[in-house]
Every structure is written in structure tokens, then in C-alpha cells.
Amino acid sequence: MAPTKTASVSGRKPAAKSAIKSASKASAKEFTGKNTPDFGKDQDLHAYREMLMIRRFEEKAGQLYGMGFIGGFCHLYIGQEAVVVGMQMAQQEGDQVITAYRDHGHMLATGMSARGVMAELTGRKGGYSRGKGGSMHMFSKEKHFYGGHGIVGAQVSLGTGLAFANRYRGNDSVSVAYFGDGAANQGQVYESFNMAALWKLPIVYIVENNRYAMGTSTARATAQSNYSLRGSGFGIPGIQVDGMDVRAVKAAGDEALEHCRSGKGPIILEMLTYRYRGHSMSDPAKYRSKDEVQKMRSEHDPIEQVRLRLIEKGWATEDELKAIDKDIRDVVSDSADFAQADPEPDPSELYTDILL
Amino acid sequence: MPIDILMPALSPTMEEGTLSKWLKQEGDKVTSGDVIAEIETDKATMEVEAVDEGVIGKLLIAAGTENVKVNTKIAVLLQDGESADAMSAEKPAAPAKADADTSAATSDAAGGKAREASEETPAAAKVPAQPRAEAAADPDIPAGTEMVMTTVREALRDAMAEEMRRDENVFVMGEEVAEYQGAYKITQGLLQEFGPRRVVDTPITEHGFAGVGVGAAMAGLKPIVEFMTFNFAMQAIDQIINSAAKTLYMSGGQMGAPIVFRGPNGAAARVGAQHSQDYATWYSQIPGLKVVMPYTAADAKGLLKAAIRDPNPVVFLENEILYGHQFEVPKLDDFVLPIGKARIHRKGNDVTIVSFGIGMTYATKAVVELEKEGIDVELIDLRTLRPMDLPTVIESVKKTGRLVTVEEGYPQNSIGTEIATRVMQQAFDYLDAPILTIAGKDVPMPYAANLEKLALPNVGEVVQAVKTVCYR
């Protein structure tokens, strides 16, 4: 008995060592603003507009929630804007996007209309799902946005299915599946990793690590908090990205999408990011300090970083940036007005869209 | 124009709260995102953030005030160049705005307030009538059509092969469907004909591959997902129900999942409690799914072809014991049956038996026994459990006045109890006896041969039940 035991332990040792080696190799890759290319003027202005649009939209949504116009759950994306905007800048037409329930930013970034999203939040006829989905459930075939899912982790398998369809059809599209650090502990995420790696499916798995799964910090929820390593057991490469810097996100997205398009299979991008607001509207945020939130806001804000660059480089004046802000506020106000004035769905809608 | 800052709600059920603390004072400059106040309810403390830029013109509610109603004006924010004068000039207009807000809130059925308002009214809300799905009749089989004795196993394989030839988007995935030729040989020969791109062996990963299948369906492919047994699909049931069944509704009709989940369901023989459950009643409860459970080979073929073509998610429940049973199948180029239509297996006048799937094996044998005793049974094979063809059952009960249901699943909340309820509601005056429901016993499936036999329904029970409702 004893010799066998020793043999098996020593037999396993080299394997364990090499696994650690390849894991640390994977972790060596990090994308920050410092080691990624600068944006040109148009790119910075574009990123600024897109991120500010999400920020202002979410602020307005929070306000409408407070006024009772939005019901149920409402998960705001404030603080994480650079992730979805940077990825969208790297994607090409036809690439699919799928995410969980903190999804308003993803919808706006794919080009879905502010009116349609806001009216869905208020449960009105003009919403993307005609008022039947709500904050967590919107879709747009036209913009290749596949939801909007309320079950933590389910979108990872579904996104893998989108990638399966791309490979089946032999097209050039890549599926981009977003999930949080909380979802990263769900079993079906690893079932999906396995199949995606086995079949070399074109999918970018994006872990939006905002440090808290609802109120549980990553330190209290995971034995491996470097989420870029979570695919190492399947041979899926991973990159850690400064998710507060839109340039780093775009550069990592470029590399990841190229990886997928060239037939190398899945890749993981861990976006280190932060949500300023609570998990949902009724979150008292007792699990983190105000200083922590304030520090992220004042030192790492994704929009402020771009704003400072635009001013420093002389690409925009304060007045021009104010004008952009005003344009965006107008679009957001218009969406809020629409979302409050638009009628609720007709009662006859109760029994529609159950079956085709 | 000065901007009113209102008392926010932390949740749709919050009506009032305490304004515990002001973090900004009159005259302070704020930008959006700045915390201006703290409010408290019995549930939580929350920060109120400014949404706009400006200068705090006036604080209208003192710190520490309790029971501040949601949407009460708590402060006024002045924008560039505005002074407190602008604020007072604005004042007369303010009540009008408040009125508008109140009326919006009370007429707003999306808000929590409206929900409560409707609770005060005891009268039932006017709910639109549920539309009735009209299922087409079975297609006519031309006179002289050759009938070929076929096993259910072959019929299912033929259905998949025909549909895969017909539509490039159809593919089959699951454990052992390709190289192994199917754990129960239902996919025999498909790999050889269609290749590994369209006949996909998966790892043992039900939750994951069900999700992959639904995602592929959302992208427009038409997957057939085989579960080695539906007992294992419990690992995947979230994807079947939350993703496949609900997406069409949640997307307002924009996106659905044309997918078939199929495999053996219910008890085989001597495989114990974890491999023997019948899920008919579970899936049949879910709006957004179609649920089919065939008995004969012809129905298996015609309905599986229909299920693959259907734009909705279909749960197709087979049975291991039935796989080897032979039935006549019409030799036609394209034999497709309507989902949602029951089949009258035998016409009769004295009593109605409703069954489906393997339940039909008990029912058909009982019919022969009862015929010997002069009881003329009308036997209905439901074939589809959702949408359920209740009109065919009601029509039969109106003729016979007596009803017995037969199934293998657990007795509580069974398909039989559902039918009994609806027949009682819709044909009460036609009933000459209480409806009896025959089901499996209320126990996990035992392994021992004698106990397993006791746990399942038997022909004697069906015969006895029919005699009881006939008062014989």
C-alpha cells in the first residue's frame, strides 16, 4: 500500500508543477493604459461620448427608480463604463453580445436606443420587450444583443451556444459573453469553458470583476481571485486588464477577438473594474468603506481619465465638453420623458409572445 | 430652471423614510454623483446622490425629519446663473408639478402604489381571455398507403434523419449520440450520414450543453438536444425553463429558441429511484414550452418531425421500454402530425380512459379485459401534454359520463389530477361518477423487483377503476 501511495504522489508532482508554471505564465499578461497604445482624438472623443451616455442614462434611471417609475430590480453600471465601451470599439459588425442583469450599459453600447431601453425600465409599450421583460430582460436581434439574463451564469452557456452557431455556420463572428466575479463561481461556467476549448469556439469570456458579488467581496468568495487564470485547467489563455482604462480594454479586446477569429478558440479577459453604486437600488453598501468608493471615483474614474486627456492634448475645450454633456443630457431626458409618457402595454399583450 | 430634488424610494414598496442627515448645505456646489443626503428606512440606510450639477438653493426638509413621504420635494438645486429669486419665482408652478407627479404615480400601474390601490378593490380585475390554440387534425393517409411495422426506436431515428436532410440548420447533440450510436441507439447511423459537425458528442455536462443548445437556437439553429435520460435533465432544467421557455415572452416576441429536448423519461426496469422519474407533469406546467409524450411509433415519428420544425422549445418525452415496441407506420415521404391534438385510440360508449406514453400499455390491456366483461371503453391517447387537447376529452366525457386517467408518474399534481379538475369545471353536469386517477405510487422508485412492480400502476388497477366508475 505504502509504496504505491508514494509512487502516485511523486507521479503527480511534476504535473502539478507544470500546471502552476503554465498558470503563472498566463497571469504574466496584463493590459493597462501604460502598455497599450494611446487613442487618437476621434477615439477618445468617441469613448468619452459613449461612456458619458451610459453614466447619464444610469443616473437618470436611478432617479426614476427613486420616483417609483421603475419597479423591481435595477442594477446600475456606473463606474464600469470603460469595459463595455472599450470592447464595443474592438468588435466588428456581427459579433454577438450577451450579459447578465447589469445590462443597460451593454445595450446602449451596442447601439440600442435610449428611449427603447428606458421605456422597458418603466414597463411601457415602447420598451424593447414591449414592457414584458424589464431591466434584466431586453434583446435586439438587429444589434446582435442576446440579453439581458437574470440567472447568474446562465448567459455564459448561452453565449457559448452563440459561438457554437458561429462555428457551425463557418462565419467570422465572435461571441462576447460578459459575467461578473460572482458568476465566475457557477458550475456551468466551467462546463462551458470545457466545451469551448474542446471545440475551439470563437468566444471571448469577459469577467467583469467589480470586486463584489452583491455584498460578498472576492476575498470572501473565491479561492482563486485571479479570474484570468480560471480557464487554465482547460488551456484557455487569460489576460488581466485595467477595466477602468478604456484604452487598455480596447487593446485587450483587439487581441482577444483576433485570437478567436484566427481559430484559436476561447480566451478570457478579466476586467478589473468597480461599481460605484450598490448591487441594486436597495443596497445599503455596508460591506465596503466610503473611502474605498471615493478613492476609485477620484483616482480611477474611466470618464474623468478621458476628459483629462482631451483637455491636456487640446482636443477639446471645457466648453466643447460641456456641449457634449448637454447633448447627452438631452437624449437621456428625452428617453425619460418618453418612458414616463408612453402607455403601458395593452392588456391583450398578457397572452402574446408565449409561443410562435 | 431650478431642479427639484425629491425624496427617493429605495424599493418599490417603500412609502416613506427618515431624512437622517444632510451632507451638503445651502450654497454648496454639487456635481452629479455627489452624495447630498442620507435617508433611512427600517431596512437600510441609503445615500442620495445628485444627478445634476448646480448649487444647493434651499433645503426644504430638516435633517432628522421622520416619515418623509416618497417624492416629497426635499431640496432645490440652482443651475448656472440662477439665484434664489428664480426659485421663488418658480414656486407658484411647483404645486402644479407636484399634482402632476401624484396623478402620474397613482395612475401608474407599474409602481407599487397602484398595486396597493388595486388590492383595495375586491372585484376581480378584468383579465383578457386566454386564446385557445386550435390544433389541426391529423393528415389523411391516402388509401393504399403501405404500412410498415417499425419500432419506436427506428421511427425516432427516421424522423431526425429526414429532418436533418431537409434542413441544414438541424443538428443533434448529447452524450454518446455520435460514435457510440446513441446510449439507446436512437441516433444509430446519423454520424455516418451527417458527420461530426451535425452529430455532436458532448462531454457529460447536461447543464452546460443544454445552455449551449439554447444559445445556438437563439442564434437561429435548430438543435435537437438528447438527454441520456430526463432524470439527468434535472441538472439542466434551469436552461430549459428560464432560458428556452421564457425568452420569447421576455423579449416581446423578438427572440425565441427553436429547440427540441428529447430522451427517455420515466421508469425503465430495475434502475432505482434516481433513474426512474416521470417528468411529464413538471414540464407540462410551463408556459412557453410544448410537451409531447408519444406512445406509438407513428406518433413518435410524426410528432418528432413536427417538434423539430416547431419554432418553439419542445420537450419530447420518450420511454426506454417503448423503444423496442413495434407499430405500423405509414410509408409516406413526409409524415408530420399536429402537436396539440389527442388521438382516439379506440372508440367506445361506456367509459373514457385518458392516457399517454407508456401509460397506454396498461390502458390498452385493460380495454381488452373490459371488453370481455361487456364494458365498451373509449380510449384517448393525449400524445401532447402541452398544449393539452382538452376539447377531445370533454367531448368524450359528455358521451360516456365516466372518466379514468392512467399514467406512471407520481400521483400528486399529476396529469390525471389536472384533467380531473378541468373536466369537473367544464363538464360537471355530464359526470355520472367521480373521476378516478391511476398513477404511480407516492414513493421513490424501489429497486427490488416485487416493490418496483407495486410502485407502478398495473392493468388490474385500471380494470378495477373502470368498473368502479361504471358502478360494477
Image (cartoon, coloured by chain):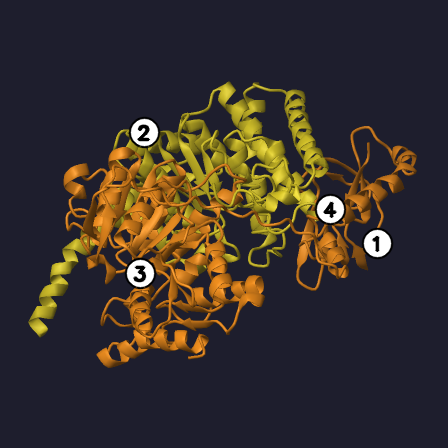
Q: CA distance from mark 4 to mark 1?
A: 30 Å
At label 4, counting other C-alpha atoms closer than 10 Å, the crowd grade (few under 14, some 14-19, many 20 or more) is some
- The tag on residue B62 is 1
Instruction: Tell me which label, 3 or 4, sits earlier in the chain.
Output: 4
Question: Taking B243 as reference, is A251 above or below it?
Answer: above
Residue sitting nearer the eye, B11 or B53? B11
Looking at the rendered structure, the kind of residue marked 2 is: Glu
Instruction: Tell me which label, 4 or 1, sits earlier in the chain.
Output: 1
Looking at the rendered structure, the kind of residue marked 3 is: Asn
Q: Which chain does orange denote in the image?
A: B
Using the rendered view, name the quadrant where residue A25 is placed: top left
Disc 4 chain ID: B
Looking at the rendered structure, the kind of residue marked 1 is: Ala
Q: Is any part of residue A228 visible from this angle?
A: no
Circle 1 or circle 3, nearest the eye? 3
Q: Which chain does yellow denote in the image?
A: A
Instruction: Tell me which label, 1 or 3, sits earlier in the chain.
Output: 1
Looking at the picture, how far across and down is residue A163, in whole percent?
A: 33, 37
Q: CA distance from mark 1 to mark 3?
A: 66 Å
Which residue is labeled 4 in the image?
B108
- The tag on residue A258 is 2
Circle 3 or circle 4, nearest the eye? 3
Label 1 SS: loop
Residue sitting nearer the eye, B305 or A104? B305
> Do tag 2 and tag 1 residues touch (Cβ < 8 Å)?
no
Residue sitting nearer the eye, A118 or B267? B267
For the N terminus of chain B, the image quarter is: top right
At label 1, counting other C-alpha atoms closer than 10 Å, the crowd grade (few under 14, some 14-19, many 20 or more) is few
